[in-house]
Amino acid sequence: MSRTRKFLIDCGSVTPSEPSSSHDEVLGLDNDIAQLTRLKSEPHKLLSRVSPGKSTLPISPVEMLARREANFSGRSRFSSADGCHVLNRYLPVNGPSLIDTMDSSGYVSQFSGDGSLFVGGFQESHIRIYNVDSGWKVQKDIRAKSLRWTITDASLSPDQRFLVYSSMSPIVHIVNIGSATMESVANITEIHEGLDFSADYDYEDDEYYYDAFGIFSVKFSTDGRELVAASSDGSIYVYDLGANRPSMRFTAHMCDVNTVCFADESGHIIYSGSDDGLCKVLDRRCLINNEQASGVLVGHLEGVTFIDSRRDGRYLISNGKDQTTKLWDIRKMSSNLSQNPYKRSLRWDYRWMEYPDRLRNSRHPNDISLATYKGHSVLRTLIRCYFSPDYSTGQKYIYTGSADGSVYIYDLLSGAQVAKLDYHEGPVRDCSWHPTYPSLVSSSWDGTVAKWDFSDNSLNQSSETV
């Protein structure tokens, strides 16, 4: 038995009877992520130690409570890791309960940072903000302005006072969601101020202005002072909200940039992913005299649809059109920025074609990812993936929407699929796990917003049971 496999067995991620998987061997290249995950999601050894003659199954919450009351750990309380270990047993897999049904495809599905609000964005100009603490009542019903094709993204400010939404246009609009007006119709009942990300462009006519580029992804910084955006012109933009203008434009990729996010609370490091199949790392502190990315992460065979940061400035995951999610450590990034994307002879279009079977087990010759997760389908739209919440799971899992209408949950360490949530009749582009409760909400192209919980459906009185 390899040392890596023994470590994963000790963590409880795999059992001795399970065959070793390629994920175990990949993670063997870097045990740091395994150790960090264990520290955040495994209980104190004196609370979990198996008594002689007892079963080797994971210790029950009741037994952990008994040992806590007897002060086995010497702390007279549960640590955050102890709590995560208990909550990890109660995944949001039961249901779903129907939250809402719309007449157009769901594109955005996001809880606020404290979980009190939920944002649902739909293709035909509609964004709804639900008050989770008030039985999922609609707090704000927003009709978007200057929509081109669809709402591509929406983001709440950290103080939950404002929401920005993007489209296939260089204009991102911002809405005051704290106002008393529930029906927010753009520039009729409320002003939706336009933030112009194309300040550096010269236009010959208005038609070119609106076709200059589109925004696929937009996110607030942790302090709420900036926005970072990914665009169809191959660039990453940072917008200074105080100065009301873009403060940085960085030409990062060879084609559409589909996703972008800040690496951590500092806002210095930015991750991006593109249709060129590359994830890039930008350190803004190094861009003053050197207009180059700090490094590149190579491994996807097709375009990158989404990136989520672990928020530690080190690890991230990405979804790719090669039908995989990959885990990365930026300490392993390549400094060879001249690398060309992986080339193959077969042409296909993910928007309407199935991924060729003969490519499903292919591997990039220069793949530097830590692990690869397979099973879900990344087709038709820019499917999103995330780390599970830190507070309740210790980021022990990753989860993703899928073009087959399901939500997939994988164990971060073993790569095992621990749950598949089936309900929707169209692709699930986005989904969101509540930051503190075992609850997950998915939005689909079938127009439905559905909520999954750990509890039995009979306990869910606030929503209509499907």
Image (tube, grey):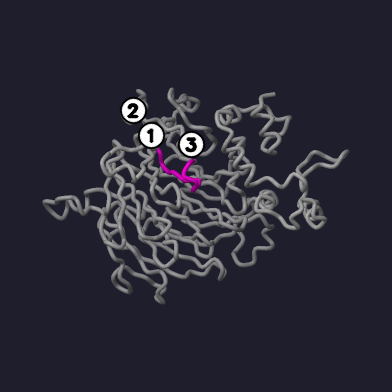
In the image, what residue occupies the spot 54% across and 45% down?
399
- As measured in the structure, the alpha-carbon distance from the residue carrying label 2 to the one carrying label 3 is 18 Å
In the image, what residue occupies the spot 41% across and 44% down?
382
- As measured in the structure, the alpha-carbon distance from the residue carrying label 3 to the one carrying label 1 is 11 Å
Residue 86 in the figure: left or right of residue 196: right
User: Which badge, 2 or 3, is on the more N-terminal residue?
Assistant: 3
Verify whether residue 304 appears in magenta: yes
Residue 280 in the figure: left or right of residue 133: left
Mark carried by residue 339? 2
Task: Assess whether mark 1 and mark 2 are in contact (beta carbons under 8 angstroms).
Answer: yes
* Residue 169 visible, this orientation: yes
Question: Circle 3 sits on which residue?
Answer: 328
- In this picture, which residue range is highlighted in magenta? 302-314
- The crowding category of the residue bearing disc 2, from other C-alpha atoms within 10 Å (few below 14, some 14 to 19, many at least 20), is few
Q: Position of residue 92 (x, y in %)?
A: 62, 52
Mark carried by residue 265? none
In the image, what residue occupies the spot 53% across and 62% down?
114
Task: Assess whether mark 3 and mark 2 are in contact (beta carbons under 8 angstroms).
Answer: no
Q: Secondary structure at mark 3?
A: strand
User: Which badge, 2 or 1, is on the more N-terminal residue?
Assistant: 1
Mark carried by residue 296? 1
Task: Assess whether mark 1 and mark 3 are in contact (beta carbons under 8 angstroms).
Answer: no
Pick whichever, 376 or 303, lies toward us. Answer: 303
Q: Secondary structure at mark 1?
A: strand
* Residue 352 visible, this orientation: no
393 is higher (above) or lower (below) than 366? below
Q: Mark 2 belongs to which amino acid? A: Gln
User: Which badge, 3 or 1, is on the more N-terminal residue?
Assistant: 1
Q: Mark 1 belongs to which amino acid? A: Val
